[in-house]
Structure formats: structure tokens, C-alpha cells
Amino acid sequence: MTDKNTEGKFDEGKGRVKEAAGSLTDDKGLKNEGKVDKGAGKAKQALGDAADKTGDAIGGVADKAKKAVN
């Protein structure tokens, strides 16, 4: 798991807390800020997942190349 995944999960959790706090206090600004944080967190996780998959694919190609050479 990449750092982006970890950051994304943190941001998403932070967003959930802000959104809940905004709902409880009827603070629309805080609620919207929470939604933005959640969205940013999900985007970071998606970026991290893509980076992980790309790294795995590159590693697989490198392994196949090594086997072919040997």
C-alpha cells in the first residue's frame, strides 16, 4: 500500500468527522468542507491504487524479461 492510500484514508476519515460535526452543529461550511475532504481522500486512494497496479505490472514484466534472458 502506498503513502497515497494512507493519506487518502486519513483524509476520508477526517472528512467524515467534519461532515458529521457540520450536520450536528448545522454548520453548512464545515459539512461541505468535510465532503471536499472525503472526495480528496477517495481521489488519493484511487491514485495510490493506480500506482500500486502500475508498479505490480512493471514488476511482472521485469520478472518475465529476467526469465527470458536466463
Image (tube, grey):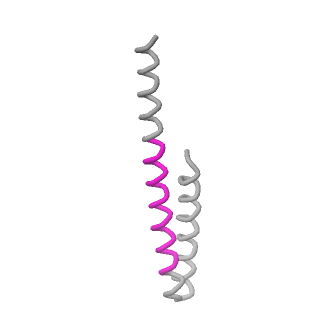
Q: Nearer the viewer, residue 6 or 30?
A: 6
* Residue 58 quadrant: top left
Quick one: quadrant of the N terminus?
Answer: top right
- The residue stretch that appears in magenta: 32-53
Question: Compared to 43, does 37 lie above or below?
Answer: below
Q: Residue at x 55, y 58 (%)?
A: 9
- Residue sitting at 51 percent across and 79 percent down? 33
> Is residue 6 magenta-colored?
no
Furthest residue in direction top, as rendered: 70
Does the segment drawn in magenta span residue 34? Answer: yes
Which secondary structure class fits the magenta region best? helix
Task: Say if 68 sits above or below 63 in the image.
Answer: above
Res. 17 image quadrant: bottom right
Q: Nearer the viewer, residue 22 or 29?
A: 29
Above or below, comparing residue 58 to residue 3 in the picture: above
Q: Nearer the viewer, residue 21 or 67?
A: 67
Name which residue lies at 54% across and 71% down.
15
Q: Residue 41 at x, y = what percent?
A: 50, 63
Residue 14: x percent and y percent?
58, 68
User: Where residue 3 appears, x then y in whole percent?
Assistant: 58, 51
State the residue at coordinates (52%, 89%).
Answer: 26
Residue 7, by quadrant, is bottom right
Residue 39 in the image: above or below residue 33: above
